[in-house]
Image: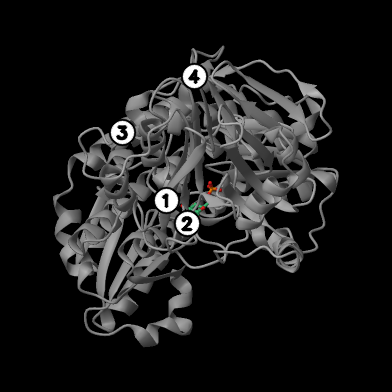
Amino acid sequence: MCGIVGYVGPRQAQDVLMHGLARLEYRGYDSAGLAVADRGRVAVAKAEGKLARLIERVDQSPLPGHAGIGHTRWATHGVPSDRNAHPHSDTTGDFVVVHNGIVENFRALRDRLEAEGVAFRSDTDSEVLAHLVARAFDGDLTEAVRRTISQAEGAYALVAMTSRQPDRIVAARMISPLVVGLGEGENFLASDIPAVLEYTREFLLVEDGEIATVTRDGATLETIAGSPVRKQPFTADWETDSVRKGGFDHFMAKEIHEQPDVISRTLGARIRPSEDGGEQVALEGLEWSDRDPAEIDRIWITACGTAYHAGLVGRVLFEQLAGIPGEVAFAHELRYGKPLFRDGSLTLAISQSGETADTVAAARLARRRGSRLLALTNVVGSSLAREADDVLYTWAGPEISVASTKAYVAMLVGESLLALELGRRRGTLSRTAERELVAELRTLPGKAARVLEDMDEVSRLADVLAGSPDAYFIGRGLDLASAMEGALKLKEISYIHAEAMPAGELKHGTLALISDGTPVVAVVTQEDVHSKAMLSLQEVKARRGLVIAVAYEDDEEIGTVSDHVLRIPRVADVFSPILAAIPLQLLAYFVARRLGRDIDQPRNLAKSVTVE
Ligand code: G6P
């Protein structure tokens, strides 16, 4: 959702804030704004649209000063517009706030404030916070923020500043993420670490219900009740390069190309030599007793978006390799359903950001109902990681492009490791089988690199797909999950209507839509259903559909029923989704390029959806 950045120190705040907003634009990009305190007043600049519009504005009329807050927005209440952009001010203009999340009782608060004579200038829920802070202020901004959050309900992060105490910015966190960045004689606030990574590596995590007061000289944390909170800073060792495009035109292209490294990193130190001369999986960070894995009788997997597709793959891996039956549920469905969690169940919550509101809520519910909670996430210290009993990190590094690529592949690798570990510890996987599968995992970085070497066919195909209003994606078993992720990628960034379904389901309705040249992308890697996949493709060919297959490079038969084949190196079938993802990502990328789409920041979407 929205991105937040704040600064107090000797530099021109505007420079730090604009830099931070550029790093955060992936969080939301329908409008942006900043406020800087200077000589007894707070100046505000905001602009609807991409950050470039705001840059133009502040280039024309800079905002000098050494303390400020900035925001990039993804609309929840009120259309994208200058007036709905943050920061929001109170009626005097002395108090400003930026806000991420939703104030759920804003209607009641707004009615009350209006009845008291406050004239609102925006349609947002956030503006109430500016008026509440102003009204609660009697000399101490921290106290005013405390009084404000005791009235506002919901999941949000808030940062406030005032011309009456211009040396500080004060933030409060209620679920939506927030960190304090610690510098020398300067300090920062941000919704995400990359926003200020170029200035500092030392961070304090602001936790739910905490208030942070940040000045040039330091940062103090306290609870809503006013008790001081002391905690150790942590160091973010991300490379600043990983938040730059590194020579690619888009973050998405860069992140697709990082995948061989990401696979190696996620495998990382989690494979170690075994006594029989081979290798075995050894997962760190799982505080499981010897009995715990054996006692898991069911696995619930919950996630949204791309992470949900990773969950579909995981379900099959846990079933096939570890003998655990499972269910995959969209987090927004699970949290309001009536799932029968039991003590022996394990819930695996998957989320790149670890901040998706629905996923965090579903995970919490599972834990409350007695399920053991394991988080699979890319962000250390994220809400999901902190909620969980155990955490398995994907080491994909910061993912900036809204459409997820490397984080997805890292999730699949993480699940593969987990399934192997569970299989060994539950006795469902023989030593030989584990050794062979670990050896296969080891080949994945090289094979992923090979897929990336030859992009000619996929780029040619993009011309074909770019001219079509629709595309269908089919697969069986694990290939269905790959097909679903491929369709989502295409929709997200090219805006072409794409629909995925089990190949066997095509004939029960959708075949009616297949005619001359209708693109059907088929993922065909699973040996046990290969002949069945061929049948489905024959059905498509018989209606003169255009078949684009993703298949192993040594699959000769596939050419007989396909117009185009995107080849991947052969790998154990259980790991094929890791490689199959790559040509499908590239296909979506090249199509979106042909169509001139905004690839890293597709319309209406946001990288991490921290509201319901
Ligand atoms: C948003 C993003 C998707 C992502 C989903 C889940 O919708 O646009 O790319 O897959 O959220 O995000 P998470 O951080 O929980 O994996």
Could you tell me how far apart the alpha carbons at marks 3 and 2 are, in whole angstroms?
A: 26 Å
Element assignment for label 4: loop
Amino acid type assigned to the residue bearing label 4 in the image: Glu
Image point (80%, 46%), residue name: 150
Amino acid type assigned to the residue bearing label 2 in the image: Ala
| Between discs 3 and 4, the one toward the N terminus | 4
- The answer to which of 127 and 491 lies nearer the viewer is 127
Could you tell me how far apart the alpha carbons at marks 2 and 1 are, in whole angstroms?
A: 6 Å
- Which label sits on residue 244? 3
Q: Name the residue under label 1.
A: 32
Q: Which quadrant is the C terminus positioned in?
A: bottom right
Image point (66%, 15%), residue name: 232
Q: In this view, does 68 lie above or below 514?
A: above
Q: Mark 2 points at which residue?
A: 85
Whether tag 3 and tag 2 are in contact, CB under 8 A, the answer is no
- The answer to which of 530 and 175 lies nearer the viewer is 175
Image point (72%, 41%), residue name: 137
Q: Mark 4 points at which residue?
A: 186
Where in the figure is residue 609, as x and y percent of width and height? 55, 53
- Left-right relation of 408 to 377: left
Element assignment for label 2: loop
Whether tag 3 and tag 4 are in contact, CB under 8 A, the answer is no
Circle nearer the viewer, 3 or 1: 1
Where in the figure is residue 353, as x and y percent of width and height? 54, 42
Element assignment for label 1: strand
